[in-house]
Protein backbone atom coordinates (compact mmCIF):
# COMPACT_ATOMS: atom_id res chain seq x y z
CA UNK A 1 0.00 0.00 0.00
CA UNK A 2 2.99 2.35 0.43
CA UNK A 3 4.22 1.91 -3.15
CA UNK A 4 3.20 4.53 -5.69
CA UNK A 5 3.17 3.52 -9.35
CA UNK A 6 4.23 6.29 -11.75
CA UNK A 7 3.69 5.65 -15.46
CA UNK A 8 6.28 7.40 -17.64
CA UNK A 9 5.21 8.06 -21.22
CA UNK A 10 6.76 9.70 -24.26
CA UNK A 11 7.97 13.22 -23.51
CA UNK A 12 7.62 14.36 -27.16
CA UNK A 13 5.57 13.28 -30.18
CA UNK A 14 8.61 11.91 -32.03
CA UNK A 15 9.28 9.61 -29.05
CA UNK A 16 5.82 7.98 -29.05
CA UNK A 17 5.88 4.36 -28.00
CA UNK A 18 8.57 4.84 -25.34
CA UNK A 19 7.44 3.98 -21.82
CA UNK A 20 8.68 2.99 -18.37
CA UNK A 21 7.21 2.55 -14.90
CA UNK A 22 8.60 3.81 -11.59
CA UNK A 23 7.63 2.20 -8.29
CA UNK A 24 8.31 4.54 -5.36
CA UNK A 25 7.89 3.39 -1.76
CA UNK A 26 6.62 6.42 0.14
CA UNK A 27 7.69 4.87 3.46
CA UNK A 28 11.24 3.63 2.72
CA UNK A 29 11.85 6.05 -0.21
CA UNK A 30 13.12 3.11 -2.31
CA UNK A 31 12.79 3.63 -6.07
CA UNK A 32 12.52 0.88 -8.66
CA UNK A 33 12.21 1.29 -12.42
CA UNK A 34 10.88 -1.08 -15.06
CA UNK A 35 11.67 -0.54 -18.74
CA UNK A 36 8.37 -1.27 -20.44
CA UNK A 37 9.16 0.13 -23.92
CA UNK A 38 12.52 1.88 -24.23
CA UNK A 39 14.70 0.87 -27.17
CA UNK A 40 18.14 -0.51 -26.30
CA UNK A 41 20.59 2.32 -25.64
CA UNK A 42 23.12 2.83 -28.45
CA UNK A 43 26.82 2.17 -27.84
CA UNK A 44 28.34 4.71 -25.46
CA UNK A 45 24.95 5.79 -24.10
CA UNK A 46 22.84 4.84 -21.04
CA UNK A 47 19.40 5.72 -19.76
CA UNK A 48 19.42 7.82 -16.59
CA UNK A 49 16.47 8.18 -14.20
CA UNK A 50 15.68 11.61 -12.73
CA UNK A 51 13.40 12.65 -9.89
CA UNK A 52 11.95 16.10 -10.47
CA UNK A 53 12.09 17.86 -7.08
CA UNK A 54 10.67 21.40 -6.90
CA UNK A 55 11.26 21.75 -10.66
CA UNK A 56 14.89 20.59 -10.49
CA UNK A 57 16.09 17.21 -11.87
CA UNK A 58 17.86 15.05 -9.25
CA UNK A 59 19.93 12.03 -10.32
CA UNK A 60 18.12 8.83 -9.37
CA UNK A 61 20.65 6.50 -10.99
CA UNK A 62 21.75 4.86 -14.21
CA UNK A 63 19.59 2.13 -15.68
CA UNK A 64 22.60 0.33 -17.14
CA UNK A 65 21.83 -3.21 -18.18
CA UNK A 66 18.32 -3.33 -16.72
CA UNK A 67 16.59 -3.59 -20.06
CA UNK A 68 14.41 -6.38 -18.68
CA UNK A 69 12.78 -6.68 -15.29
CA UNK A 70 12.79 -4.22 -12.41
CA UNK A 71 15.94 -2.42 -11.20
CA UNK A 72 16.53 -0.75 -7.84
CA UNK A 73 17.64 2.86 -8.17
CA UNK A 74 18.74 5.54 -5.66
CA UNK A 75 16.45 6.43 -2.75
CA UNK A 76 14.48 9.61 -3.35
CA UNK A 77 12.99 11.54 -0.43
CA UNK A 78 10.43 13.53 -2.42
CA UNK A 79 9.50 14.11 -6.05
CA UNK A 80 6.76 15.65 -8.12
CA UNK A 81 7.68 13.66 -11.24
CA UNK A 82 10.17 11.19 -12.70
CA UNK A 83 11.88 11.28 -16.10
CA UNK A 84 14.36 9.20 -18.09
CA UNK A 85 16.94 10.71 -20.42
CA UNK A 86 19.53 9.18 -22.73
CA UNK A 87 22.98 10.26 -21.53
CA UNK A 88 26.61 9.47 -22.21
CA UNK A 89 27.66 6.25 -20.47
CA UNK A 90 28.31 6.95 -16.79
CA UNK A 91 25.66 9.67 -16.61
CA UNK A 92 25.61 13.36 -15.87
CA UNK A 93 24.90 15.49 -12.78
CA UNK A 94 22.11 17.23 -14.76
CA UNK A 95 20.28 16.02 -17.88
CA UNK A 96 22.14 16.85 -21.08
CA UNK A 97 20.50 14.30 -23.37
CA UNK A 98 16.98 13.93 -24.70
CA UNK A 99 14.23 13.29 -22.14
CA UNK A 100 12.52 10.17 -23.48
CA UNK A 101 9.77 9.61 -20.92
CA UNK A 102 8.16 11.64 -18.14
CA UNK A 103 5.47 10.99 -15.55
CA UNK A 104 3.94 12.98 -12.70
CA UNK A 105 3.61 11.55 -9.19
CA UNK A 106 0.00 11.19 -8.13
Image (cartoon, rainbow, N blue to C red):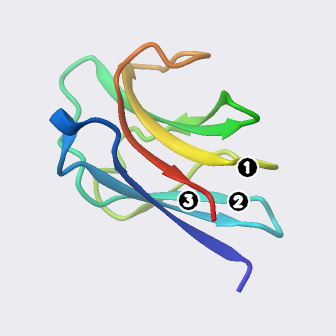
Asked if marks 1 and 2 touch (Cβ < 8 Å), the reply is yes
Choose top left, top right, bottom left or bottom right for residue 32: bottom right
Q: Count neighbours of disc 2 (C-alpha within 10 A) and say few if under 14, some if 14 to 19, many if 20 or more.
A: some
Crowd class of label 1 (few under 14; some 14 to 19; many from 20; radius 10 Å) = some
Q: Helix, strand, or loop for circle 3?
A: strand
Residue in view at x 58 percent, y 17 percent:
94
Residue highlighted by disc 2: 30
**Mark 1 near mark 3, Cβ–Cβ under 8 Å?**
no
Instruction: Specify the quadrant that holds the N terminus.
Output: bottom right
Decide: few, some or many residues near mark 3? Use Cα within 10 Å; few <14, some 14-19, many ≥20.
some
Residue placed farthest to the bottom in the image? 1
> Which mark, by number, is residue 100?
none
From the top left corner, tell me how far across and down residue 81 is, in percent: 60, 47
Residue 32 - label: 3
Image coordinates of residue 87 in percent, x first then y, are: 39, 20
N-terminal label among 1 and 3: 3
CA distance for labels 2 and 3: 7 Å
The answer for how far apart the CA atoms under marks 1 and 2 are is: 5 Å
Looking at the picture, how far across and down is residue 55, in whole percent?
Answer: 69, 31
**Which residue is found at the position 81% from the left and 49% from the top?**
77
Q: Earlier in the sequence, mark 1 or mark 2?
A: 2
CB-based contact (under 8 Å), mark 2 and mark 3: yes
Task: Please state if 39 lies on the left or on the right of 57 as rendered.
Answer: left
| The quadrant where residue 14 appears | top left
Q: Which mark is residue 75?
A: 1
Where is residue 104? Give x, y as percent.
56, 53
Q: Residue at x 43, y 41 (%)?
A: 63
Residue drawn at 63 percent across, 71 percent down: 4
Q: Is residue 65 left or right of residue 4?
A: left
Amino acid sequence: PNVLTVKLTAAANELNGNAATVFWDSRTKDVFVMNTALAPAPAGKEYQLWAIVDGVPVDAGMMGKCAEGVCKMKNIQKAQAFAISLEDAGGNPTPKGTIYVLGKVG
